[in-house]
Image: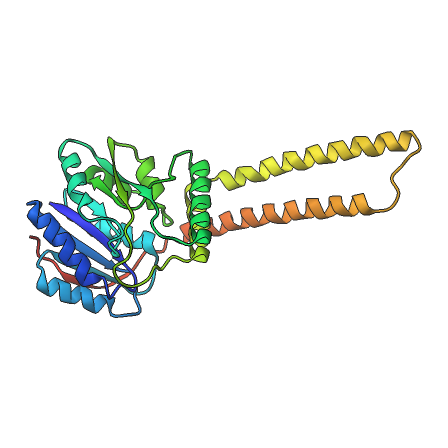
Amino acid sequence: MLSVIIPAYNEEKMIAAASEVIHRILDEAEIGHELLFVDDGSRDRTWAEINAAAERLPCVRGLHFSRNFGKESAMFAGLECAGGDCCVVIDCDLQHPPEKIVEMYRLWEQGYEVIEGIKEDRGEESGLHKFAANSFYRLISLATGMDMASSSDFKLLDRKVVDSLNAMPERNMFFRALSFWVGFKRAEVSYRVRERVAGESKWSTGSLVKYAITNISSFSSAPLHIITLLGFVMLAVSAVLGVIALVQKLTGRALGGFTTVILLLLFSSSLIMISLGIIGYYLARIYDEIKGRPRYIISETCGGEHS
């Protein structure tokens, strides 16, 4: 059986369409499946729509969070509760083409264990949002050492991969990078991002920046290494200025005024504050991990029959 995990946040207009379209495509392909909607603490009628879909279609199950815990938590909740031999994660807005699930499933039948959805383009986006997204993927690729420029959360995972991800004890998890990190036999399926049928995107440029900072820090220690690099840069600048000051002192042409000193102090103070900020952020992440609080809390469930 195939489990289709569908995170949803304020997607009341898309639940019915997503459940019917995905179910029809998989039913026509004769693929046994369950549709597992994870309501990430929506403030609209998303949960009511999921309950209605579960009444119409026996293959629909639903999980409702007690509050908004974020998309990463919703995806991992789906992975932990899914009962399929393989799992697909797909967005509720249908911008990921559901018919590609069949192509992924056929590759899984051939023995591939991670089938990655690769974007051919990002669809219609504002220039600022596209720049922010491209910058994020360049940063995360550098930080993780993996090419994630065209990757997405749209992918199929074999049960072995799902079990490996579920066994990880960490609280702050980056699904897209971890699915790369675990390895296994991989294949790719390309797709074009579609326009939304209804509703609006929940990803603003600001939320994308926050998402980038959170996930880079949860998966990579690269920002901490940047502090060491900044220290060597500061050492080189100080050495050059020190040699210049010594030469001018010995030749009787010492610098006049305090401009150089002030600029140097401002520069060094800025580096120190940035470094302390990075270290403080990682300490906060360590504190969150040590507390050991659950990644999510499920307040309600619905459905439960498999097709």
Front one among 269 and 97: 97
Can the viewer see residue 33?
Answer: no
On screen, residue 303 versus residue 286, left or right, reads: left
Can the viewer see residue 160?
Answer: yes
Residue 277 at x, y percent in the picture = 57, 50
On screen, residue 61 versus residue 282, left or right, reads: left
Front one among 287 and 3: 3
- What residue is drawn where x is 38% and y is 35%? 147
Residue 248 at x, y percent in the picture = 87, 32
Rendered-image quadrant of the N terminus: top left
- Quadrant position of residue 161: top left
- What residue is drawn where x is 25% and y is 32%? 186
Q: How is the image coloured?
A: rainbow
Residue 51 at x, y percent in the picture = 16, 66
Q: How many marks?
A: 0
Residue 265 at x, y percent in the picture = 74, 46
Instruction: State whether residue 159 is above or below residue 50.
Output: above
- What residue is drawn where x is 22% and y is 42%? 156
Front one among 150 and 186: 150
On screen, residue 88 versus residue 54, left or right, reads: right
Instruction: State whether residue 126 is above or below residue 45.
Output: above
- What residue is drawn where x is 46% and y is 57%? 206
- Quadrant position of residue 291: bottom left
